Amino acid sequence: MPPDHALLLSTVLVFLGLLGMLVRRSLLAVLMSLHVMIGGIVLALVAYTGRGEPGASAASFAAIVSIVAILELAVGVALVVAFFRNRGSTAIERAGLLRW
């Protein structure tokens, strides 16, 4: 895949993730949209660093960012489960009830 196509695809992924974050009302859907955005950013970074001299730096950087994104997703899902157990819903409107 040419780098220009990968950059275009990554832009589409970031905007789809942003649209999902703005439209969805469920915390889990917002978290999934955030993960789609991170995937688009990783794809853009790999495509951009792949334009230069060949090496494993782009692949290793993508692996590190992907591992951090998976850890972020695990923490986010744990928070959503705790929120659901506490409030009985994953609607974002109920998140305002978490104030003191």
Image: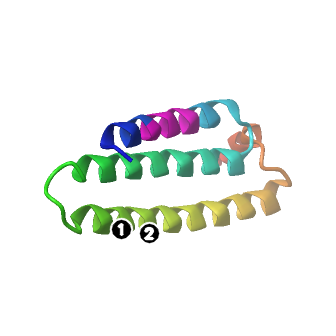
List x then y, in percent, for residue 92: 72, 40
Viewer-proximal residue, 59 or 15?
Answer: 59
Give the residue displayed 69% in from the left and 40% down from the top. Answer: 96
Q: What type is the residue that disc 2 sits on?
A: Ile
What residue span does the magenta drawing correspond to? 9-18
Tell me which corner region of the image, top left, top right, bottom left or bottom right, holds residue 17: top right
52 on left or right of 4: left
Look at the magenta stretch and give its main secondary structure: helix
Mark 2 and mark 1 residues within 8 Å of each other at the beta carbon: yes
What residue is shown with label 2? 67
Q: Nearer the viewer, residue 87 or 71?
A: 71
Whole-percent x, y for residue 59 in the image: 31, 65
Of the pair 19 and 92, the residue shown nearer to us: 19
Residue tagged 1: 64
Residue at 83% of width from left, 50% of height from top?
A: 89
Say left or right for 56 vs 99.
left
Tell whether 35 sits left or right of 87.
left
Q: Amino acid at mark 1?
A: Ile
Name the element at disc 1.
Answer: helix
For the point 40% across and 50% down, the residue is 43
